[in-house]
Amino acid sequence: MKRFPLTSALLGLTVLLTACPQPQPPEPSKPPAATNPRIVPLDSTKVSGLVVDTDFALDSMYIGSTRSTFFGEILLPKNTAGTALGTLTPGSADLVTGQFVDGCTGTNSNPAARTLFNTLYTAYGTQGDLLGQVYEAVVGGADRGLPEPMVARLYADSAFSFKGSCNIKLSDGSVLVQSVDINVAKGWNALVQSGTGLQSSLKNASADAQVTLTFLGIEPEVAVVIEADPVSISTDQPVTVTAKLIQVGGYSGTVNLTTDFPGLSVSPSSFTLPALPKLTAQGRLSGDERLGAASLKAQLVSTTLTFDFTGPSVVNAPFGVTVTDGAGRTVGGGEAQLNVARPGFSLRAYADMGAPTLVAGETQGLPVIVGGSISSDTRVPVNVLGGTSGITGNPTEVTANNAVQNIPVTVPATLAPGQYEITLMGQVGKVREEAKVMVQVLPPRTALGNLGTVPSLTSSNQGDLWGAQQGSFLKIQGTALAGRITGGGLIQHVQVGPDGSVWGSGGGLYRVEGTTIRSYTGVSSFSLSTNFTVDATGRAWLMNFDGFNQPSLVNVDPVSGTVTAVATPVSANTAVPVGRSGDGQHILFIAADGRLVSVTAATGKATVSSDPVLNTAAGETARFWLLDRAGNVWLAHSGMRARLLRLDPVTAQVVQEVNIGNVANESGGYVQAAVESSSVAWFIRSDTLVRMNLTDGTLMETPLLDRSSTALRMQYHAIALAPVSGVAVTFGSGSTTGATSPDPEYLRVIR
């Protein structure tokens, strides 16, 4: 009958059958005093006696060797041994060299001697069930006085003697120190091992030693051995394999079977294991009759298990079968390999650049591609699982033709911008595929109508946002379009003065007057392509330049329309951007030599910085004049050492300098900027909002357009500070995959 080997996982004991002498069983396994013990004289040539401390019907026990756990069978009719060791001669593969050499110090008369050493026999029941271990406890004679003495059986292929000490490393990493003093004859020898803790001794047994065969029961378990390993599945049909349920330690009762592999089920899922026979039912079988006793009808040792799998089309992985009792406690198990190879499909999200983007608070189409070895006209139901993000989807059939198709996905409005992992899941028959996908969630947006591109956006002291778009001014309150004022020419730049007046420039110079737009003349159209500003009294200021003559700083009176030139000690060499202080009392520009010029708006008096602020000879030029939330004035300039400069408008000196090269000099650079404070600034790239920490230079990027679109990624966005501290507002086009024109304009609020 087939035996199943004793393992440390089943027994919780390590049987050291190889290189080093074994320590005796740990103290928790110390046998209780034998009841009605069978005491026999120790015989070095024979193992005999009644096995005590068990009422199981034992069949046999094994000495074991490095070659096989089942070397040296000792039959136990009526639980009684009587086997002459002379009939059990180990082969060469059963012996080891260096038993008392490796890890030992002392004198060995024959280091080449090969040995087999054992103190514990593995014991099996009449149905082949592994029940425990047996050892020979020394209960009489001179050796009885040693601490916890037990017999060690040693076979040697040649005689030797050894006196010294051996260090034996145990499985927990500790070291057992064993003192040894033995004289060994060729053949079988009887030694006595004794000791406690990590101290042990080994000696020849005394001539008057008496022993009792003592049983050590193991923790009852059920071992599952799947004989058809691997379990191979090539279709959607279940697969039935042969298996054995082994009642380790005499386990009996109803047990349940499950697997630890997702999608893999096993049936039958429960078995009832009858109690093993006790000593009164002892009977040894032989030949075919013995094998028959090991079948399902007796102890459910042999059976069939059916495995059914719903999951990926290709799997090559280990799995476990877990055995639990009625209370759900694990009482055993087994392992095998699962091989699945059947027609299937592939599933992935599509984005031609970066992660697919979704907008918080909206239901959108997530582009996916399904292909694979199944028919190209197969319809695969695909769903989206968003996990803790709360992103959801409705099951949608997608054709497995390797084409981009959209499935609807809904993102909670409260989900913070950032990257989230979602799971795409599709199933056809029992083939289920999953794909982990990172998606970029954009801030909530509000549709403001099909407005077209809005190139400029600014905030007012009253908390409104004003945008410039073609020939109109757009007024935005909160997240809604509050009004559109038309009647001007092309408006590219919009500015709101400290007094609340709204001006724009582009095809001309314009100002909002109630529900109409007033146009102003007297300044060169060349000057209107750059940024201008508005002072505290509502006058517009810009660098007037006709392309030929010396540029001059001018202001435009909002009532009379009078254009007044203001003389400055140094001048610009082109129509440079003009900025102002937060209170509108000072007007600022960069002169041709790179110095900062600050003009008092009320008097026209100019202050010029002592040193250049920009290295104009090296190509540094002013790009944007910006005001932070506290009213501090900043200059963003271009060049190899692109910087943000916070300036003092009274002294014309640099107060703070921040290197922004990691934004400005990246591919595409930036198109607009806004400064929140001395520690935070915002930049708009072609399709990305960049939040920069001005203290340490770290960046946080948020895509602004649908990256699955190749048609409209370059749509223009404008940016301004929102009325709420720490928030920026962007205004620009969205896009749809494959679209050739912009979607409606959106207002996005980003923290």
Image: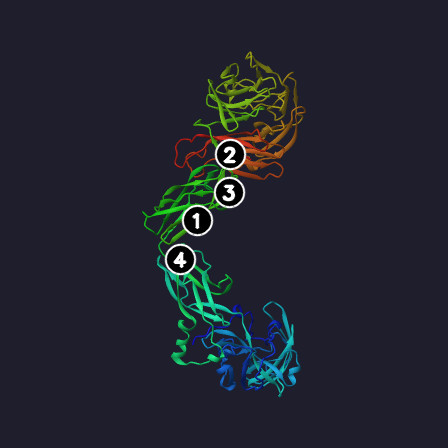
Going from N to C along the chain, the mark reached first, 3 or 4, is 4
Q: Which residue is mark 3?
A: 419
Label 1 vs label 2, nearer the camera: 1
* Residue 257 in picture, x, y percent from top left: 45, 63
Q: Are marks 1 and 2 in contact (CB under 8 Å)?
A: no
Does residue 403 appear to the left or right of 172 in the view shown?
left
At x 40%, y 54%, the residue is 312
Label 3, label 4: how many angstroms apart (C-alpha)? Answer: 33 Å
Label 2, label 4: how many angstroms apart (C-alpha)? Answer: 49 Å
Q: Amino acid at mark 2?
A: Arg
- Farthest residue toward the front? 280
Q: Are marks 4 and 1 in contact (CB under 8 Å)?
A: no
Q: Which residue is mark 1?
A: 435
Q: Amino acid at mark 1?
A: Ala
Disc 3 element: strand
* Relative height, residue 700 to residue 524 (above, below): below
Disc 2 element: loop
